Image (spheres, rainbow, N blue to C red):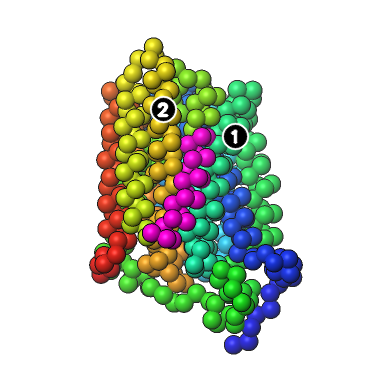
Amino acid sequence: MLPVTPPPLVSWFQRRGIYYGWVIVAVMFVTLFVSLGFRFAFGVYYSAILDETGWKRADTAGVVSAAMMVYACTAALTGYLFDRMGARVVFTLGALCMGAGLILCSRVETLTGLTAAYGLMLGLSYATLGFIPHMAIVPRWFVRRRGLASALSLSGVGLGSLAVATLSAELIGRLGWRETMWWFGVGAMVILLPVNVLFHRHSAARVGLAPDGLAREPAAQGAPTTGVTVREALRTRAFWLLALAMVTTGICNMVIVVHQTRMLVDMGYSLMLASLLFGVLGVLRAGGGLVWGSLSDRIGRASCVLIICGISVVGLALLWVAALLPAEARGLRVTLLAGYLLTYGIGFNGISPVYASAVSDRFSGKNLGTILGLLDLGFGLGSALGPWWAGWMFDRYGNYGGVILGVAVCVGITGYGMWAATRRGARTA
């Protein structure tokens, strides 16, 4: 097969010594900054909605649970569409769903209306703009530096969490949560549509490049191989271990996303400060992802998982103790919260690049997006269960102590599943 001539835009970067794969990483960073930055900052809106409406915590957290159920139901479809139609089509659809969904949410007046609007539209946007398609892109551009590229892309989530959470808290204080959500809906479309339509390309092979910026090769040599089929993946032990890890990862992530800000408000901190602390957790997520993504390329995915989950359990123990202390023990409580932010933020929050690289290592090929989507069905189910369960626990017992312990158990299960699936000598069938 004859070599593919790079398009003019790709050639423009190549002439300046810039491998276009890093442009793709930058586009993914921006997209995740906006889309998942908002998803992970929802706790700010959750607290404001509770204050305005007086709805029960479990019922209000059900808004996010509905979105994650839609996410779970469409995860595999999103991966399949990505494999067949490419990033520009899928991400354009996602940007439209996110913008329209936020605008619609800002105008509804009832819990049922908010659950329906947020659940359907934002659930679709989280699937089409989220983890699955982005991590399916990375192996199409990188092989040797896959962990680093994944980490740089996913750092947009952490930094976006800080920016969106703090900006949202400021705007909510001035405009209210409804107007703030409306402006974020408009902004999402203004930013995401042109960036993805203009700059995204599906793979290095389709533009005449080889992975990692090596010498250009014929498209047939650089194209993704057929690799593992979906049926073959489903028959492996590694797939089901990773699926188990994704269920518990979803519980952990979305419990923290939805309830941490409110928990800090309950402890006597202002919404602005609680949002800032959540944003700090996001920045540490980005830093941890960069550390673990690159380190896992060197020492292996399994070793990184053990370290990550070990320090994360320590962090949750610090949070549990801080939640038990009275307000008078301000100095000690601040110290414990700082320890929690550092350990859990750098630890479990940064596990995504390791997971993405582990799946790519096992199941790379043209069906990777579909396989990631099937695995993320578990993440969606865990993410739907976690926020509601945590709200129910608080409504029943009046505190988050049991929730924190439950999250620690889920961290341990995640660690076991990912370690067993990625360790050397692990059985794959």
Q: Name the residue at 31% across, 25% down.
A: 321
Task: Give the CA distance from mark 2 to mark 1.
Answer: 29 Å
Q: Amino acid at mark 1?
A: Met
Q: Position of residue 103 (x, y in %)?
A: 61, 38
In primary-sequence order, the first of circles 2 and 1 is: 1
Circle 1 Cα neighbour tier, 10 Å, few/some/many (<14 / 14–19 / ≥20): many
Which residue bears the numbered disc 2?
337
* Residue pictured at 58% horizontal, 31% vertical: 166
In the rendered view, tell whether residue 143 sits above or below residue 337: below
Q: Residue 181, labelled with which disc?
A: 1
Is 182 drawn above or below residue 429 in the view shown? above
Magenta stretch, main secondary structure class: helix
Residue 88 quadrant: bottom right
Where residue 136 appears, x then y in whole percent? 49, 62
- Residue 120 in the image: state x and y as whole percent: 49, 45
Vertical order, 142 against 282 (above or below): below
Residue furthest to the top? 328
Quadrant housing the C terminus = bottom left
Query: Quarter-wise, where is residue 17 in the image?
Result: bottom right
Q: Relative to 187, is 408 on the left or the right?
A: left
Q: Which mark is residue 80?
A: none
**Quarter of the figure with residue 226:** bottom left
Give amino acid for label 2. Answer: Leu
Q: Which residues are magenta?
A: 279-299
- Crowding near the residue tagged with mark 2, few <14, some 14–19, many ≥20 C-alpha atoms within 10 Å: many
Q: Is residue 83 magenta?
A: no
Q: Position of residue 411 (x, y in %)?
A: 31, 43
Q: Which residue sits at x=60%, y=22%? A: 173
